[in-house]
Image (spheres, coloured by chain):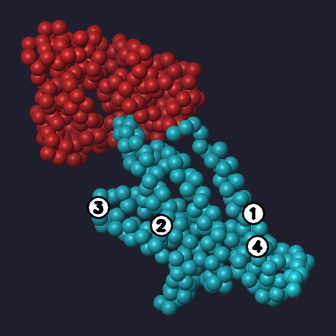
């Protein structure tokens, strides 16, 4: 028997799907911004010679990188729930994505920091800059530039992984798709359109990232 | 005045400086010569406290550099330093390289910092390179940028760490000319250098470093032309072929 496509229902529900797509974009952008901030701190901690400083960072990285994202979302939603901490599906997915993003980006950033010659620190110091100024004006701008492409990959990963929100009933693109197809039984149509939307979101993000890079990163390293 | 008193410095079990005594008066040019690993560059790093010392004292204008209570970020404003590898900031333009520290360390307004940076860049002959990125310039130009960047902080002393050693031979001249110009401006300078002829020409004092101690010190005439110690004679006969 041939499958008969019925697209009209999908187009009727397009506003809901777009809404879901917006939530997907929203949660991934936020998970990246928070993840990047935490990862900068973790990377600096991880490079410390004092074990008491580096150990918590190492633990974070090891757990985040060596357990499935699915479990992390379950932990944030059901796991914390068992201890009386009830997160909304959105908050649970966001915290899980932040946790993983920070874990992966820490290693990326650490590599970026280590690629910057030590002499950049000495030169900055010799000009009277303090540590905060050295990081703010000299080290971080060069570090971000070196790791920019791996960082955008992580961004794409976040967008795609946020689809796991489907498991905790989040209303992002996958959750919406799931809900709409179960009401209409047009499974294939809805998932095809959702897949196209994911594709477009990641392309949009990569395109914007490239634009930003062209504007922000001048000169060569 | 910079006073270096009985300074000892070790990296792990390797003692690099074994009791260095040296005085540099205002307006003086002191050149430090000697073989690789003799500790001459390390001494510069100790003077502006990028490296710690284990024993002795370094006093810059009555400030004990390595004392616990000393604000070293502030002290380093007095001491400009230029490195063998010029260490330009690759993500900043030439003008930004030279104006950053005055802006964020000396808290100058953007305009004022730019003015000072432009003046110093003009001074070292980079007046047409303000918006260029350092990585697109020659080593000699980058080294002159490093000098202007340090001068923009209005330091009282300049420390030069083998500033021509990493340059292609044809670029050495322009950097040495810049140093001569600074000497004529009356800048107090300590130059660690392998350019013996240059040291002889510009220095008030020459110190010959050998195995972590100052083996011989005096006027260029005394140390370079008529060295008394055997180690100095050996070193000079090797470099002045």
Give the residue number, with chain letter if any, for mark 4: A194
- Give the Cα separation between the discs numbered 2 and 4: 28 Å
**Do the residues at discs 3 and 4 belong to one chain?**
yes
Label 3 crowd bin: few (<14), some (14–19), many (20+), radius 10 Å: few
Quarter of the picture containing the C terminus of chain B is top left
Secondary structure type for disc 1: helix
Give the residue number, with chain letter if any, for mark 1: A200
Q: Colour of chain A?
A: cyan
Task: Indicate the chain on which mark 2 is placed.
Answer: A
- Give the Cα separation between the discs numbered 3 and 4: 48 Å
Q: Are marks 1 and 3 in contact (CB under 8 Å)?
A: no
- Give the Cα separation between the discs numbered 1 and 3: 45 Å
Q: Are marks 2 and 1 in contact (CB under 8 Å)?
A: no
> In the image, what residue occupies the spot 38% across and 37% down?
A123
Q: Which mark is residue A50?
A: 3
Give the mark nearest the N terminus, 2 or 3.
3
Secondary structure type for disc 2: helix
């Amino acid at each position: 028997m041939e499958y008969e496509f019925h697209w009209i229902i999908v187009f009727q529900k397009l506003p809901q799907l777009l809404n879901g797509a917006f939530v997907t974009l929203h949660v991934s952008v936020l998970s990246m911004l928070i993840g990047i901030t935490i990862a900068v701190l973790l990377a600096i901690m991880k490079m410390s010679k004092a074990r008491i400083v580096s150990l918590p960072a190492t633990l974070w990285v090891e757990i985040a990188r060596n357990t499935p994202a699915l479990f992390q979302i379950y932990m944030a939603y059901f796991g914390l729930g068992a201890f009386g901490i009830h997160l909304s599906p959105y908050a649970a997915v966001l915290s899980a994505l932040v946790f993983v993003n920070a874990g992966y980006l820490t290693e990326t950033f650490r590599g970026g920091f280590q690629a910057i010659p030590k002499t950049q620190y000495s030169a900055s110091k010799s000009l009277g800059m303090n540590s905060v100024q050295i990081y703010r004006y000299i080290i971080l701008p060069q570090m971000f530039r070196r790791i920019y492409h791996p960082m955008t990959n992580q961004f794409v990963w976040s967008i795609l992984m946020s689809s796991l929100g489907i498991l905790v009933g989040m209303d992002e693109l996958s959750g919406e798709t799931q809900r709409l197809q179960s009401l209409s039984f047009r499974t294939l149509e809805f998932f095809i359109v959702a897949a196209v939307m994911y594709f477009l979101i990641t392309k949009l993000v990569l395109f914007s990232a490239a634009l930003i890079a062209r504007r922000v990163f001048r000169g060569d390293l | 005045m910079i006073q270096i008193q009985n300074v000892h410095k070790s990296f792990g079990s390797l003692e690099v400086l074994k009791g260095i005594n040296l005085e540099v008066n205002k307006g003086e040019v002191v050149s430090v010569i000697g073989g690789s690993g003799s500790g001459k560059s390390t001494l510069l790093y100790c003077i502006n406290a990028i490296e710690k010392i284990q024993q002795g004292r370094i006093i810059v204008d009555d400030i004990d550099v390595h004392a616990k209570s000393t604000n070293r970020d502030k002290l380093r404003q007095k001491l400009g330093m230029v490195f063998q590898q010029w260490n330009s900031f690759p993500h900043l333009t030439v003008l930004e390289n030279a104006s950053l520290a005055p802006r964020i360390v000396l808290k100058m307004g953007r305009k004022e910092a730019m003015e000072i940076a432009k003046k110093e860049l003009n001074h070292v002959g980079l007046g047409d390179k303000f918006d260029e990125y350092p990585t697109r310039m020659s080593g000699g130009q980058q080294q002159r940028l490093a000098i202007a960047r340090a001068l923009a902080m209005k330091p009282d002393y300049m420390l030069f760490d083998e500033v021509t050693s990493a340059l292609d031979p044809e670029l050495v001249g322009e950097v040495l000319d810049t140093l001569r110009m600074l000497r004529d401006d009356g800048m107090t300078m300590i130059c660690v250098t392998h350019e013996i002829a240059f040291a002889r020409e510009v220095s008030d004092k020459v110190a010959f470093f050998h195995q972590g101690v100052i083996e011989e010190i005096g006027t260029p005439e005394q140390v370079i032309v008529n060295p008394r110690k055997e180690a100095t004679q050996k070193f000079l006969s090797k470099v002045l072929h």
